[in-house]
Amino acid sequence: LQKAIQQQDRQWRQQQQQKQRQPSPGDNTVVVHSARCNLDQTQDGIAAGGSRLAQEVNQILNQYRLENKTVSLSFVGNSLGGLYARYALSKIPAILESTTTATPTDDNGEDDEATCQSSSSPWVRPAVFCTTATPHLGVSQHTYLPLPRAAEYVVANVLQPTGSDLFRYTSVVQDLAFDDQFTKPLVAFERRWAHANAHQTDFQVPTATAAFVDPQSSSLHQVSTPCVVGTPAMAGCNFWKLAVETKPAVSAANNKLDKEEEVNSTQLAERLDALGWTKIFWDVRSTLPSIPLPPLPYFGDRILSGSRRPESEDLSKRVNYT
């Protein structure tokens, strides 16, 4: 588990108090580890935070390796923590060893032989990579209220190196989506989940960047069922709004970029979709103070944003139900 930007140590401990489990010799149960390496130091950039997270994870995995144990490994990253986790994957040898056994499918649903080379069975099995309200597209042009680029520059400088990364004054967000050192270990996971808050209820990470959706994207989204994204009990959850899936597409995932080429949000969204994700949208409006606010003008394609876009055009009616 990896926390969000500027999330306080006390808040993080409270969230994990009921989840923390410590391993014991011979114990074949689930162990939840709350990463602490980035507590109170989230402003020195995604690369720095991701590297610290990788070091902490490697220390834990090394203990299991010395005990000759097989590990099923999952990540849950909240907000900035999701980007830290995506970066960290490139620096965790146990996950990199498993990438040679990953079998993504091509556009026709068949195995891509070029990536299915034989290797010894990995001792770490990448299981689920999950993000919650993570700005996968960065936050440039994805703020709650649109900002001119000049204003983004000011905010980015206030947030120091992390701000420069998030507002895409550096190439980190683009590299995470297009550089094989980051995408190959991500593809190695059996499932990839991205949770996003809908209806403009997330001030820091709007839906479009948390679920990497873009009006110009050609990615097909298919409606999924609650059972696919977790447990059948989710079907009765008052906050669960919609779940959609994108299927792995090798031809798109293998697109290469020149080092100096800059991509837009549409290309970022399509590239991530090509890795295959389940996106879960949540409606938490019932938990928020009911203070009437004037409607915001519609800026860009805010999927499930609750803005002035006609209800018939929300994501639930634009995806393929088959």
Image (spheres, rainbow, N blue to C red):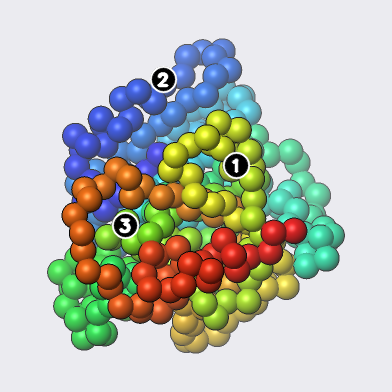
Judging by the rendered image, the residue that carries numbered circle 3 is: 202
Q: Amino acid at mark 3?
A: Asp
The answer to whether the residues at label 2 and label 3 have Cβ atoms under 8 Å apart is no
* Vertical placement of residue 119 versus 80, above or below: above
**Pointer 1 or 2: first along the chain:** 2
- Residue 134: image location, x then y, percent: 40, 56
**Frontmost residue, 267 versus 308:** 308
Q: Residues within 10 Å of mark 3 (few under 14, many from 20)?
A: some
SS at circle 2: loop
Give the residue number, with chain letter if any, for mark 2: 22
Residue shown at 26% from the left, 84% from the top = 149
Eyeballing the image, is 87 above or below 93?
below
Q: Nearer the viewer, residue 319 or 252?
A: 319
At horizontal 57% and vertical 61% (from top left) the residue drawn is 316
At horizontal 48% and vertical 44% (from top left) the residue drawn is: 240
Q: Earlier in the sequence, mark 2 or mark 3?
A: 2
Of 160 and 107, the residue lying toward us: 107
Q: Residues within 10 Å of mark 2 (few under 14, many from 20)?
A: few
